[in-house]
Image: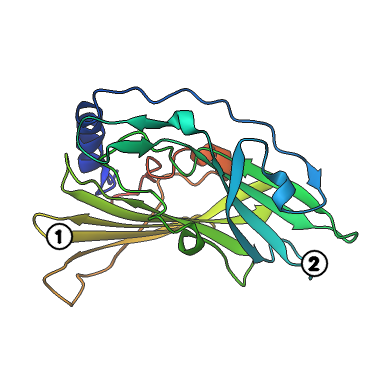
Amino acid sequence: MLRHPACLLLTIACCLMPALARGFEVPDVTYPAIAERAATTEAFAPPGWRLEHLARGRLDADDREDALLVLRMDDPANVIDNSGFGPDRFDTNPRMLVAVLAQPDGSWRRVMHNHTLVPRPESPVMDDYLDDDPAHAVTIHPNRTWSVALRSWASAGTWSMRQVSHTFRLEGDCMRLVGYDDMHLHRASGETMTTSVNHLTGRAWTRPGSIEDDAPGPQRHTRLAANPRLCIDEVGDGLSYLPELLDQ
């Protein structure tokens, strides 16, 4: 099997981050239930949460414009003092993703809610996983798919930087993972590795490169070692999800 090129550095980073974040504990949170139907998109934000971003586009086969919501908890108790690396006040409020379909009567019906794909902030040395711009990171595409772009960038503890995008499509009651793209950069060496996976076909490719060389390396075609139908809740943490590729 071919190990994903980011696995080793990601493991090292995960070991170092808790040490750099010592001095506080991330408060526990309880994720609320989300209404199944609502008269407006804003009404899907439960008490104590705010609508951070709303993307519009078609998620199902009708002609009505649907919506994808990024909700963020808004609890001052989750903004905590930090005496180590990173900001003096660190916001650990988590996010949720909610997909809603427009109904003929003008109301909205929830078809997905998820609070694991976008990781909760737990280390003050890590930049915002949505790059401080949910409007850029969460997008509905013209072909009825939608994607979330995550960014892993640390100010201390690791040279590893990643940009990961997950693409989904609504299939019945499953928000199915159909695409995965990952660009890994080692900031010291400048070496890059790009991985792209089509979860519908099971095909994938990887390509090495360098920020010092405009010409990318050769594209190596491969396949997933296994290709089960994954719904969004089965993906888990979007930065921890690493598809395993065949060595061929």
Left or right of 1 on screen, residue 73? right
**Residue type for callout 2:** Asp
| Residue located 89% across and 61% down the image | 104
> Which amino acid, by three-letter code, is at mark 1?
Glu
Q: Is residue 248 visible?
A: no
**Whole-percent x, y for residue 176 in the image:** 60, 50
Residue 74 in view: yes
In the image, residue 145 above or below residue 227: below
Q: Does residue 227 appear left or right of residue 22 in this picture? A: right
> Percent x, y for residue 166?
47, 54
Q: Residue at x 40, y 42 (%)?
A: 241
131, 230: nearer the viewer: 131
Q: Badge 2 is on which residue?
A: 62
Determine whether 205 is above or below 82 in the image: below
For the residue pair 9 and 204, the one nearer the viewer reads as 9
Query: Distance from label 1 to label 2 (Cα)?
Result: 45 Å
Checking the image for residue 101, the label placed there is none
User: Of all residues shown, which one is farthest toward the right?
Assistant: 105
First in sequence, mark 1 or 2: give its number.
2
Q: Secondary structure at mark 2?
A: loop
Can you say which quadrant of the picture contains the N terminus?
top left
- Residue 75 percent location from the top left of the image: 52, 33
As helix, strand or loop, the secondary structure at mark 1 comes to strand
Looking at the picture, the colour scheme in use is rainbow
Q: Quarter of the image holding residue 107?
A: bottom right
Neighbor class of circle 1 (other Cα within 10 Å; few <14, some 14-19, many 20+) is some
Q: Nearer the viewer, residue 211 or 195?
A: 211
Q: Residue furthest left?
A: 189
Look at mark 1 in the image and give the residue it sits on.
191
Identity of the residue drawn at 30% across and 35% down: 123
